[in-house]
Amino acid sequence: MAAQFIFRRWNWYKEQVIKPIFSQRQSLVTRFVLLIILSLAILYFDHSYRALSQVRQWLTVAATPVLFLADLPGRIWGTASQVVMSHNDLLQENARLKARNLILEQKVQKLASLTAQNIRLRELLNSSELVDEQVLVAEVVGVDPDPFRHRVIINKGAIDKVYEGQAILDAHGVMGQVIEVSPVSSRVLMLTDVAARIPVQNHRTKYRAIATGTGRTDRLELQHIPVTEDFQEGDLLTSSGLGGIYPEGYPVGVVTRVIHNSGDAFASIEVKPLAEVNRSRVVLLVFREVSGLIEPINAAQTGVSKTKAEKKTDEVRR
């Protein structure tokens, strides 16, 4: 009986009090004011008696997945942006380190080629000037499609003070020389091209010779070497500096085979170039320094064309 009485009283309260409050006949302003009063009462009751702390905790737990999903796009975008920025920074740092490493290796090559004997001779001659070249880092951007011509294009040209006949190095040794210059790019003739010639010197015996290209990326040849000359497998050949094109003392190649044919007055010597002519992407342009000033050498001085190159080769051989 008591339960029925309470139920009837609740229905009467709902019909007489609660329903009229939220009936559609009430204005929006009245509803808004009543909701504000109700919210303030709940806040005061919770602040004073902590009665809704448990409810608040459950609501927080229930809202956690919603908050996570709402924040997920921002997190994904932030992570992606950070990864892209980190990747770009690493690429730039890698490029800087490669250029710096190439310059340092070039300096090591130069120091390796200067023996203690040469230093003592310079001191005896009261010479205080050591050969030191200015270099410019360039990148190979094109390759000649003709398989019988070993030529590449680099991304430095006349605006960078590149000149015809300028020597090209990579991280391992002499690579070739510039044969054609445009404002923003240059064409390079590799050592291994059949038209290429470079004056070299045996680092062990100091004998000078001319290395010629064979059309193969893994081989140069020394021709017309008397059989009496001392050449051995493993001998290091460096640039002799004769001819005024290639600077002196840079590694060119290593002797891999010495052929003595019976009855021949000359030996045939095969040389493996140290420069990675078909792999190197970053190269060095070497500027010859005269009396502290960089002096470009024009085509007439360097003998870039095939006819002048042959004349220069003949002069060196004589």
Image (tube, rainbow, N blue to C red):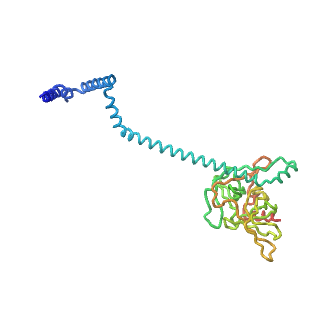
| Residue that appears at 71% across and 58% down | 174
Total marks shown come to: 0
Quadrant location, the C terminus: bottom right
Query: Taking 185 as reference, is 31 above or below it?
Result: above
Q: 1 or 285, which lies in front?
A: 1
Q: Answer with the quarter of the image where residue 1 lies.
A: top left
Query: Taking 46 as reference, is 77 above or below it?
Result: below
Residue farthest front in this picture: 1
Image x and y of residue 236, in percent: 75, 61
Image x and y of residue 232, in percent: 77, 66
| Residue that appears at 82% across and 62% down | 205
Q: 132 or 1, which lies in front?
A: 1
Image x and y of residue 252, in percent: 73, 60
Q: 298 or 248, which lies in front?
A: 248
Residue farthest left in this picture: 1
Image x and y of residue 216, in percent: 67, 67
**In this picture, residue 243 sits left or right of residue 175:** right
**In this picture, residue 207 sits left or right of residue 185:** right
Q: 121 or 248, which lies in front?
A: 121
**In this picture, residue 303 sits left or right of residue 124:** left
**In this picture, residue 290 sits left or right of residue 104:** right
